[in-house]
Image (cartoon, grey):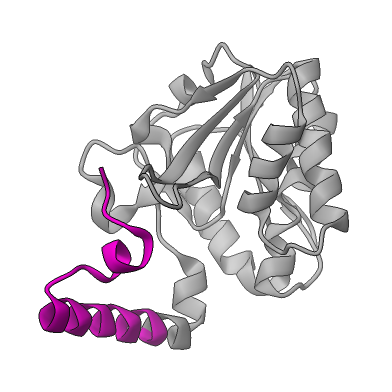
């Protein structure tokens, strides 16, 4: 299968990847980007399971850095959608642009980077972080690209990280709000209806727990948020 590319990369280019079964989604994403004259290169990879595919993300960014060495790379999942120009997302001053998710709390704080949308400048420090992330994705027993990116951040010295402005973070389309420029429409949930059912069942159990105990399940398990 062939890559999907369009536009004339200048100061930035969008990169992403897709397996054969996701090609229609990638083609739709390409059309969406082209509607706003956003240059992009979506790389075709061989079939993999979902977790295996997510571990290709740093390699995809590395391919884009190789193919467009002077451009800032905006890495995006192909189930993202844009609602307008995104050049401002590439205009970071740090080495890497990332958004973080999680909850800050006294007991068991949880914080991790989202890899739906990441921005990589053509700096040596960005290359160091990318190389560390890629190595972890290829060798670690952990099959979660976001946890491994967090580990890579902890292991890499001298990098400057900038938090992306929220309108470019790729929040879920149903929650992002009308001003969001990059949103996410989960293809994984669409192709795995059992996961959606499992999530809905878990939410129902948590509601029942709260009704019986008077406490939110997450607060009971992890402690209340400050």
Q: Which residues are magenta?
A: 197-226
Image-based side of 167 in relation to 189, left or right: left
Image-based side of 203 in relation to 22, left or right: left
* Image label count: 0
Question: Of 200 and 80, which appears nearest the observer?
Answer: 200
**Where does residue 167 sit, x and y in percent of width and height?**
34, 34
Image-based side of 82 in relation to 148, left or right: left
**Where does residue 115 sit, x and y in percent of width and height?**
57, 46
Question: Of 124 and 83, which appears nearest the observer?
Answer: 124
Image quadrant for the N terminus?
bottom right
Asked if residue 65 can be seen in this view, the reply is yes
Asked if residue 68 can be seen in this view, the reply is no
**Where does residue 116 sit, x and y in percent of width and height?**
53, 48
Q: Give the residue at x 76% y 19%.
A: 125
Q: State the predominant SS element of the stretch in magenta.
A: helix
Residue 192 to residue 179: above or below: below
Image quadrant for the C terminus?
top left
| 215 falls in the magenta region | yes
Residue 138 to residue 208: above or below: above
Question: Of 207 and 108, which appears nearest the observer?
Answer: 108
Residue 68 to residue 106: above or below: above
Q: Give the residue at x 36% y 67%.
A: 221
Q: Give the residue at x 47% y 36%.
A: 99
| 43 falls in the magenta region | no
**Where does residue 13 sit, x and y in percent of width and height?**
63, 30
Q: Work out which residue is located at the far top of the displayed protein and give it.
A: 93
Which of the 4 quarters of the picture holds residue 169?
Answer: top left
Image-based side of 67 in relation to 6, left or right: right
């Amino acid at each position: 299968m062939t890559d999907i590319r369009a536009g004339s990369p200048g100061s930035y280019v969008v990169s992403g990847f897709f397996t054969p079964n996701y090609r229609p989604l990638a083609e739709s994403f390409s059309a969406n980007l082209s509607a706003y004259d956003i240059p992009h290169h979506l790389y075709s990879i061989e079939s993999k399971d979902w977790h295996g595919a997510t571990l290709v993300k740093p390699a995809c960014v590395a391919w884009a850095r190789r193919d467009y060495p002077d451009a800032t790379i905006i890495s995006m999942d192909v189930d993202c959608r844009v609602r307008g120009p995104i050049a401002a997302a590439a205009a970071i001053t740090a080495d890497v642009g990332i958004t973080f998710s999680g909850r800050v709390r006294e007991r068991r704080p949880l914080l991790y980077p989202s890899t739906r949308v990441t921005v990589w400048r053509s700096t040596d420090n960005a290359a160091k972080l990318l190389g560390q992330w890629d190595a972890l994705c290829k060798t670690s027993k952990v099959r979660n690209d976001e946890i491994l990116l967090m580990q890579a951040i902890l292991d890499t010295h001298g990098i400057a990280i900038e938090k992306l402005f929220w309108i470019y973070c790729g929040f879920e389309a149903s929650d992002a709000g009308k001003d969001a420029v990059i949103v996410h429409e989960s293809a994984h949930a669409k192709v795995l209806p059992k996961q959606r059912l499992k999530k809905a069942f878990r939410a129902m159990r948590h509601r029942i727990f709260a009704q019986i105990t008077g406490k939110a399940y997450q607060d009971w398990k992890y402690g209340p948020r400050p």
